[in-house]
């Protein structure tokens, strides 16, 4: 069942915001729409919620078509059985915490909402604050009220519109885990919109990367991070270094002329050029001739610049005119000749475009 | 047509609104967004939209079209006549052209003086170590609600040729040849300035308090002395707001009717608004020329408002950041005396002395400048309660202000909802139409309705209904501005959250939007109530003996030169209305307001 989006199109005036995208979200699955601002991810979410009318395509929730402009079908948001958490939380300031959470039950005409409200507040750990006014709550607490309100109506799907972007970093980490836990407990499909790669990687069962109204690629967090298919994905999820490697004599060569070992055989045409993705955090530095480099890929470079960050040092290494960004623990001076080392499984060639 | 120019975005302006002029010009929702999906009870909201649009269209267009028609006819309303352009040609005659010049001259002088003094008081109260700022603010706000015709009456009693000052000169001090006369251009400007200073003050206080403190701090850090910062940074930053309230003050001056009518007609100083009135009221009437003058005056105010809104929109982008920082207090030092003189002197002239004089005159049997020789009596008050006509005007005012304002607020709430929230097709036209009457002087609107209902088969001329129609039309923009200013602050997601939680559109409105907008609805009601109570200009051509309201009753007493009754009724009605408002505020819980 879950959510099924097929060929969704959304147009504002003369601008097409979403270009016919399709994806499914299975029951109990947590799917994140990830992309830069303006990529159409929030619009897609709002189309699923029914807050926007679509211009094409079909949206199904729980096996029922809720939006199909060609057939003239549009199910209003209040009839879609949703739970939605907004970026601004949208806690109603004129109601107490309990009244906020009881609202979805009340408007559906449920008389005995008290137990459900208590349950929902318990799930988010706010039982003690039921009688408070929203203005007395911190940002994190308001966020959890929004979450409790979203689950109180026993929705068929959960929708999240960048719910953590207004929280400070520490609170964000905690709430991330909480949202994942609650969604797994309820076992309903969830669509989560964010531009934060850490949120996407840590919470999702599956990530859909979007750019300019298209789906760039989708996959497991681990796969998208380590084996992206597109340069855009590699660049957006964790800043990546791109090296151009050349195929020659059955091997791939880095710009400095050294052979690049991969963890598998990657066939290529003689003289073929490919882009290799190299994560800044998967590199180490050592001095030339250091035995630590044995068995690893080692590129010859020079420290062009460095910034001391505390847990690591952010280096800019010049490899035959190409600058690599590397986060390493080893300490070197600016101008030092170094070897940049990394394991064969840490370099990944993007497929041919 | 009056505000032809304001076609683009038509959030009309809050000239007389108690809210600062800057605030209501709130940012609109994103322009690109299509209208929201209609669902649930959509048909109900849809048909209400149609009804509201038709009603607003009728309210606004009927008097306008009637005026246009009237300006092209050579006969009185309802009389057989012929088409003519003579009325428009007559605008260029030396007499009318002179009236134009007088109107604009008075407008420029009065608006500049009001802007200077109003801004000075606002700066003194909010930016210096002036003592008693709270009291001054409260009293200035109170004088804001003192009707212009009552203020003008008080100053006529004080300064007309047969008034108090001249009486003191001649009878008490025996000075011959010393004469004061307020029936002059200077007198008119003087009273107009007194009347408009609170408006400028209220409009400037917001920007002055809300100014981003870092601008000044940066100037201080760069080495500027407090005075240099005021001159080089603060005032230039406020210049947009200042210009904007200057222009609005100009509009208020040229459309002002009561002051030039009471003071100018005896002194043969004629402005456009009074010229129109004289043409209609005194034989031989010339309705056609009056209509042409009315439209020309509306065009003048329309252009000024259009200009003001462009200025205000620009200014909003540059100065206010919404960050409330702590602004440094400027020490008055040896200027304290001047500051006290300005603030208290103003309040004395605009509020305290007029009230004292009205009280004095209201208990006199015969007018005398010497309180020691006065024969005192309460008969003016006794008469008010014995006279059925006066008692009826109290009831009429309660009906017109109480119910009329309610109707106005409901209409304005629907308009704001459709133009700012739902935005169905054609919402811009509705927005524009609703803002049109704002540029229409009251006496012009009155004339338009006079024309219109001479032809329309609705027998409402001379009833309270036509007064309610006139007042609602005239002040609709005040209410939409107040409510709209609040609506745009209510984040869209609050309503969306209700929908996704399972609420229909109607439930969302009832459970979320209305409770959150309630303070503005209440505010708009009080604003309209007071505006209706003190309105005279649009009523003066429409009232009859049976539809007298308080303002028109006071007006007629004064026209009959019955200063005692006019004074006692002025005081009594102000007390009754303030008490009524206060009671209403207690009942509706206006002292509490919802938080966002």
Image: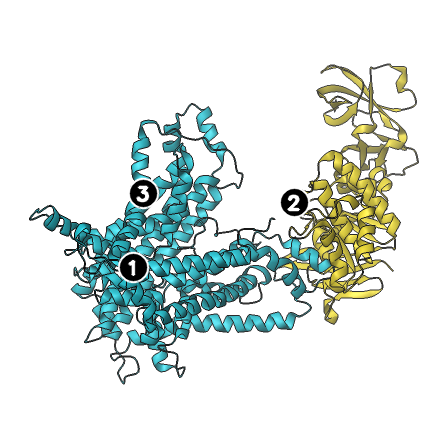
* Residue A254 seen: no
Callouts 3 and 1 close, C-beta under 8 Å: no
Please, is residue B74 above or below residue A260 in the view?
A: below
In this orientation, which residue lies closer to the viewer: A263 or B124?
Answer: B124
The residue pinned by badge 3 equals: B117
Chain drawn yellow in the picture: A
Neighbourhood count class around disc 2 (C-alpha, 10 Å): few under 14, some 14–19, many 20 upward: some
Determine whether the residue tagged by mark 1 lies in a helix, strand or loop: helix
Visual hue assigned to chain B = cyan
In this orientation, which residue lies closer to the viewer: B51 or A91?
Answer: A91
x and y percentages locating residue B319 in the rendered image:
47, 41
Neighbourhood count class around disc 1 (C-alpha, 10 Å): few under 14, some 14–19, many 20 upward: many
Callouts 1 and 2 close, C-beta under 8 Å: no
Q: Nearer the viewer, mark 3 or mark 1?
A: 1
Estimate the spatial distance between the alpha carbons at disc 3 and disc 1, rounded to whole Å.
21 Å
The residue pinned by badge 1 equals: B149
Q: Chain of mark 3?
A: B
x and y percentages locating residue A45 in the rendered image:
73, 54
Q: In terms of sequence position, does the residue under pointer 3 or pointer 1 come before the other?
A: 3
Q: Chain of mark 1?
A: B
Please, is residue A314 above or below residue B551 in the view?
A: above
Determine whether the residue tagged by mark 2 lies in a helix, strand or loop: helix
x and y percentages locating residue B482 in the rendered image:
49, 56
Estimate the spatial distance between the alpha carbons at disc 1 and disc 2, rounded to whole Å.
45 Å
In the image, taking residue B166 as reference, residue A117 lies left or right, namely right
Q: Quadrant of residue B388?
A: bottom left
The residue pinned by badge 2 equals: A135
The residue at 29%/37% (across/down) is: B341
In this orientation, which residue lies closer to the viewer: A323 or A248?
Answer: A323
């Amino acid at each position: 069942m879950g959510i099924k989006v097929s060929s969704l199109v959304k147009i504002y005036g003369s601008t097409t915001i979403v270009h016919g995208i399709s994806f499914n979200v299975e029951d109990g699955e947590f799917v994140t729409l990830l992309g830069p601002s303006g990529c159409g991810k929030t619009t897609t979410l709002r189309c699923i919620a029914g807050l926007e009318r679509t211009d094409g395509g079909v949206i199904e929730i729980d096996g029922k078509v809720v939006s199909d402009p060609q057939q003239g079908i549009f199910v209003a948001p209040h009839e879609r059985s949703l739970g939605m958490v907004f970026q601004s939380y949208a806690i109603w300031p004129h109601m107490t915490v309990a009244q906020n959470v009881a609202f979805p039950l009340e408007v559906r005409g449920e008389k005995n909402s008290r137990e459900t409200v208590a349950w929902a507040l318990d799930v988010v750990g706010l039982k003690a604050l039921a009688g408070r006014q929203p203005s007395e709550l911190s940002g994190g607490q308001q966020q959890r009220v929004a979450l409790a309100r979203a689950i109180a109506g026993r929705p068929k799907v959960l929708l999240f519109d960048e719910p953590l972007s207004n929280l400070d970093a520490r609170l964000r980490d905690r709430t991330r885990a909480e949202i994942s836990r609650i969604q797994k407990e309820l076992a309903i499909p969830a669509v989560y919109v964010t531009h934060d790669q850490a949120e996407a990687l840590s919470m999702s069962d599956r990530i859909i990367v979007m750019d300019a109204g298209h789906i760039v690629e989708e996959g497991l967090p681990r796969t998208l991070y380590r084996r992206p298919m597109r340069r855009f994905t590699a660049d957006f999820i964790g800043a990546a270094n791109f090296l151009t490697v050349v195929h020659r004599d059955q091997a791939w060569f880095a710009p400095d002329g050294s052979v690049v070992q991969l963890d598998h055989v990657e066939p290529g045409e003689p003289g073929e050029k490919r882009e290799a993705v190299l994560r800044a955090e998967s590199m180490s530095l050592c001095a030339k001739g250091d035995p630590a480099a044995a068995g690893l890929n080692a590129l010859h470079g020079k420290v062009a610049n460095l910034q001391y960050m505390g847990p690591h040092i952010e280096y800019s290494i010049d490899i035959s005119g190409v600058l690599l960004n590397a986060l390493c623990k080893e300490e070197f001076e600016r101008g030092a000749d170094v070897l940049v080392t990394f394991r064969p499984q840490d370099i990944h060639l993007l497929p041919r475009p | 047509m009056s505000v032809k120019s304001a076609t683009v975005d038509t959030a009309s302006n809050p000239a007389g609104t108690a809210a600062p002029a800057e605030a209501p010009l709130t940012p609109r929702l994103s322009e690109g967004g299509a209208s929201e999906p209609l669902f649930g009870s959509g048909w109900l909201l849809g048909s209400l939209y149609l009804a509201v649009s038709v009603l607003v269209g009728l309210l606004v267009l009927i008097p306008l079209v009637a005026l246009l028609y009237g300006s092209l006819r050579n006969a009185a309303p309802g009389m057989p006549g012929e088409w003519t352009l003579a009325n428009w040609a007559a605008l260029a005659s030396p007499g009318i052209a002179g009236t134009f010049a007088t109107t604009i001259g008075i407008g420029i002088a009065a608006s500049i003086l009001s802007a200077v003094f109003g801004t000075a008081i606002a700066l003194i109260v909010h930016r210096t170590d002036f003592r008693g700022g709270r009291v001054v603010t409260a009293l200035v706000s109170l004088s804001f609600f003192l009707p212009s015709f009552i203020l003008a009456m008080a100053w006529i009693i004080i300064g007309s040729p047969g008034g108090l000052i001249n009486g003191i000169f001649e009878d008490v001090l025996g000075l011959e040849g010393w004469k004061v006369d307020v029936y002059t251009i200077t007198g008119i400007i003087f009273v107009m300035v007194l009347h408009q200073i609170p408006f400028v003050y209220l409009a400037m206080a917001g920007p002055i308090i809300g100014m981003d403190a870092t601008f000044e701090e940066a100037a201080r850090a760069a080495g500027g002395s407090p005075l240099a910062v005021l001159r080089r940074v603060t005032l230039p930053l406020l210049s947009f707001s200042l210009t904007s309230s200057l222009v609005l003050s100009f509009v208020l001056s040229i459309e002002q009717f009561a002051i030039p009518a009471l003071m100018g007609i005896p002194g043969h100083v004629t402005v456009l608004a009074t010229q129109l009135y004289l043409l209609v009221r005194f034989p031989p009437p010339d309705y056609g020329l009056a209509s042409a003058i009315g439209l020309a005056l509306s065009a003048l105010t329309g252009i000024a408002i259009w200009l003001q809104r462009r200025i205000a929109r620009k200014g909003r982008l540059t100065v206010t950041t919404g960050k409330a920082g702590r602004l440094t207090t400027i020490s008055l030092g040896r200027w304290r005396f001047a500051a006290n003189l300005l603030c208290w002197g103003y309040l004395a002239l605009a509020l305290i002395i007029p009230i004292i004089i009205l009280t004095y005159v209201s208990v006199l049997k015969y007018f005398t400048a010497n309180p020691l020789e006065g024969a005192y009596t309460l008969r003016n008050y006794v008469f008010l309660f014995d006279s059925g006509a006066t008692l009826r005007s109290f009831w009429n005012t309660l009906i017109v202000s109480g119910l009329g304002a309610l109707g106005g607020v409901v209409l304005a709430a629907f308009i704001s909802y459709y133009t700012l929230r739902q935005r169905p097709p054609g919402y811009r036209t509705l927005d524009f139409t609703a803002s049109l009457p704002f540029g229409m002087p009251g006496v012009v609107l009155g004339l338009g309705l006079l024309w219109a209902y001479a032809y329309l088969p609705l027998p409402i001329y001379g009833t309270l209904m036509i007064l309610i129609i006139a007042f609602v039309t005239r002040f609709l923009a005040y209410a939409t501005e107040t409510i709209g200013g609040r609506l745009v602050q209510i984040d869209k997601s609050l309503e969306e959250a209700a929908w996704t939680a399972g609420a229909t559109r109607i439930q969302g409105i009832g459970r979320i939007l209305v409770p959150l907008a309630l303070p503005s609805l209440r505010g708009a009601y009080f604003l309209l109530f007071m505006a209706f109570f003190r309105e005279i200009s649009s009523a003066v051509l429409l009232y009859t003996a049976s539809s007298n309201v308080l303002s028109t009753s006071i007006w007629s007493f004064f026209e009959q030169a019955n200063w005692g009754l006019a004074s006692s009724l002025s005081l009594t009605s102000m007390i009754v209305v303030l008490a009524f408002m206060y009671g209403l505020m207690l009942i509706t819980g206006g002292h509490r307001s919802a938080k966002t």
